[in-house]
Amino acid sequence: MDNQNSQQKPPSTANPPVENPVQPPPFITPPTSKSFLSNKILLLIVIIIILIAVGGKYLALNSKPKPEPVVSKVTPTSGPTPLPSITSVKESSPTASPIDETANWKTYTSQEGKYSIRYPDSVKIYVNEKFSVDGVKIPVVDTTMFVSDELPQLKTNYQMSINHKITGSVSLKDFIDKNSPCQEIQSSKGKTFILDGRQASIFENVPCGPYGMTVIYALNNGIGYIIQIETHVSYNDISKFTNQILSTLKFTQ
């Protein structure tokens, strides 16, 4: 019995309690350089697409053709355009005729000298008389004087004499040289001057007489004309007035 009790009991075969194993934390894979590069490329592509879209819109707006001005076309008529008549042209574009300042001037006619000439009211006329340096009238032959104490335009005195004489058949050159009042007047020094359509010769501002003078020589049908202009100013100052008077001189034969 004791032997039975003292007999050892076999070890228990029961399984020991199983412990739950500890799970390690999940491993997070760090982003690789390859995925980072692909993100940058994608962002760059998006930016490029945006720029292309904006640029395309800008170009589209600026490339629109500007509206051209509308030009109305004139439809030609089948018949020819009538030309304006002479009357309508005159009425539509009148031209101002020049004013003849000598129209109301007085007219003097020399029967012996075979000429006529006009002169304004500011000029007095003396036939076969001339004023000396002292202002005294002296008789002269075949001479007409045109005198103004003061020309309104120039505020100066003015004296022009026209002397005529029978010359017969003579040249203008010989007539000048034979009737020169001083050495400064020679036919070779004269300038051409037209008097009633005929060629004459003028000598401006020659030192003849007490004040100097301008002399014009002309011929017409056997009569010679000597025109002397005396004044205190240069001929350039009184040339317009002188030419205005001489433009009215007409030979009557």
Image: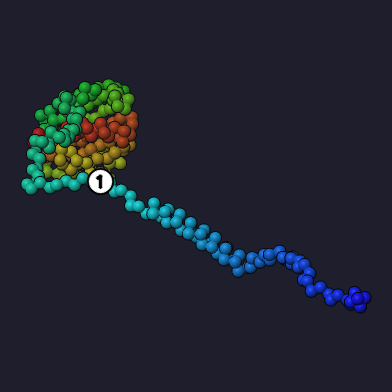
Q: Can residue 167 be spotted in the picture?
A: no
Q: Can residue 243 be spotted in the picture?
A: yes
Q: Where's residue 203, x and y in %?
A: 27, 40
Residue at 18% over, 43% down: 199
Q: How many numbered marks appear?
A: 1
Q: Where's residue 157, x and y in %?
A: 30, 25
Secondary structure at badge 1 equals loop
Q: Which residue is mark 1?
A: 70
Q: Where's residue 177, x and y in %?
A: 23, 43
Q: Amino acid at mark 1?
A: Val
Residue at 28% over, 25% down: 151
Position of residue 237 in the picture relative to residue 13 (left or right): left
Quarter of the figure with residue 12: bottom right
Out of 126 and 240, give the one closest to the viewer.
240
243 to 104, vertically: above or below: below
Out of 197 and 50, give the one closest to the viewer.
50
- Quadrant in which the C terminus appears: top left
Decide: few, some or many residues near mark 1? Use Cα within 10 Å; few <14, some 14-19, many ≥20: few
236 to 24, vertically: above or below: above
Q: Where's residue 175, x and y in %?
A: 19, 42
